[in-house]
Image (cartoon, helix red, strand yellow):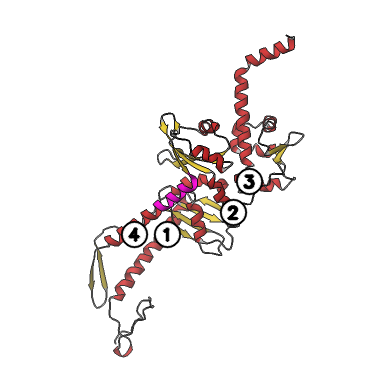
Amino acid sequence: MPEKEVAAETNEQENGEKTEVDRDLENAIIRQVEYYFSDANMSRDKFLQEQTRLDEGWVPFEVLIKFNRLAKLSTDTEVIANAISNSTLGLLEVSDDNKKLRRNPNLPVPEMNEERRKEYMSRSVYVKGFPLTATLDDLLKYFNDFEGVEHIFMRKYIDKQSKTRKFKGSVFVQFKTREQAEKLINTPNLKHNDTTLLLIWHEQYVKQKQEEYLERKDKKMKNNKNKGTETDVSITRCSIWLKFKTSESPKEEFKLPTGSVFHFSECGKSITREDIKAALTELGAEVAFVDFKTGDTNGWVRLSKENAAKEIEPKITDGKLKIGDSEVVFKLLEGEEEKKFLDKTVETMVQRRKNQRTFKSNKSKPFKGKYNRKRKQDPSDEAPAAKVKADA
C-alpha cells in the first residue's frame, strides 16, 4: 500500500472519535439552518425576510452566527458553510466565496394564510409519553428513523419554584408530507423505552382541547347559575341595605391568574376579537377575554389559567402570529406591567358587578312619575329609573 494511503488510514483511525463528533455537529448545523429558511419560519420571521431582500436572497454567515441556537453550535463561518454544502435537501445554496447563503430561488416561500396553517397541522402529529428529562437531541435521534421530519416542537411549561421552562413530555412532530406523517401515526404500539406513546393528529388534538374548554366553561356557567349568592335585602325610605353572606371583598372575588396576559400589536383593520381568539386556541390556549375592537392596531388578551400565556409563548415563533393578512406581534406581560393591567381589569370587573347589583335593586322598587302616575316600563328599556324631585 502506498505510504500516503497508509498515513491517511492511520490518521482516520486515530481520529475516529473526532470524526464522529464532527459528523454530529455538521448534521446539527444543517438541521438548524434549514429550519431558519423553512416554510414555517420564513413565513413569520420578518428579520430574515428583510435580510433576503437586500441581496437577491443572500444572507451573510456573519448575520446568521448572531442567532442564538446556531451560535451555540458554532460561530465559525467556514465550518457552517462547509456543513451546508453537504446538505442533501436542496433547500439552500452557498455562495462561491463561502461567505453567504440563500434559499433556493426555485423553492419560493408559500404565502402563510389560514389555509396554509391548516395544511401544516394536517401533516403534524402530537406525541406524548417521553421522559421529562429528554432533550431536543434525544428526540431528534428517536425520530431519525422516520423519513421527512421537518420540525419537532417540545411542549414546555413554567415551573413555579425554579421559574424555568420544563419539558411536558409531549411534542408536535411536523413532516414534509401527510403520507410521511401517517407512517408515524399508524405505527402500532410505538414505544420510547418501556412507555407506549400516545399518537394523535395535531388537528384532532386542537379540536379535543377546544371541546374540553367548552365543556368546562359550560359546567362552570351551570354551577354559577345554580349556586347564586345569598342576600338579605332591607329597603328603607332613604336607602337600600345589602348584606352578603360571603365576607370576601369584591377584589378578592376577582383574583385573576398571573402569567396569563399578552399584549398584541400591528393588527390589520379587518381583524376581529374572534380572529385573535381562534389563532390562540389553535395553539392550545384557553382564552378568557380579549380587550380589542376591530379597527384598533393593538389590544390585550387574557388566558384562563395561571402561567397559561408563559406556556403558549414558546409556540409563537419570534413573537409573531399570522392572522388574516397581518403579522400580529405578541408580547407577554410580566412584572409591574402585568400587575397594572390585572389591577385595572379587577377594578373594571368590580364596578361592573356593582352596577349590576344596583340595577337589580332599582328594578324591585315601584316607580312613580309626574302626577303620581306609574310609568309604563318599556320591555327594551334597560336603563335605571329616572330621578324624581323630592317633596319640599
Crowding at mark 2 (Cα within 10 Å: few <14, some 14-19, many 20+)? some
- Which contiguous range is marked in magenta? 201-212
Give the Cα distance between marks 1 and 2: 33 Å
Q: Nearer the viewer, mark 3 or mark 2?
A: 2
Please state the horizontal and vertical placement of residue 45, each as a whole percent of the image: 62, 47
Q: Nearer the viewer, residue 5 or 356?
A: 5
What numbered label is drawn on residue 113? 2
Residue contact between numbered discs 1 and 2, judged by CB atoms under 8 Å? no
- SS class of the residue under badge 2? loop
Which label is found at residue 42? 3
The tag earlier along the polypeptide, 3 or 1, is 3
User: Which residue is label 1 attached to?
Assistant: 345
Query: If you read the primary sequence from the N terminus, does the residue marked by circle 3 or circle 4 appear first?
Result: 3
Figure check: 141 above or below 271: above
> Is the residue 138 above or below the residue 230 in the image?
above
Instruction: Look at 41% across and 53% down and name the residue there.
Output: 211
| First of labels 4, 2 by sequence position | 2
Quadrant assignment, res 392: bottom left
Does the residue at mark 4 contact the one at mark 1 (Cβ under 8 Å)? no
**Picture coordinates of residue 334, whole percent (x, y):** 47, 49
Mark earlier in primary sequence (3, 2): 3
The three-letter amino acid code for the residue at tag 4 is Met
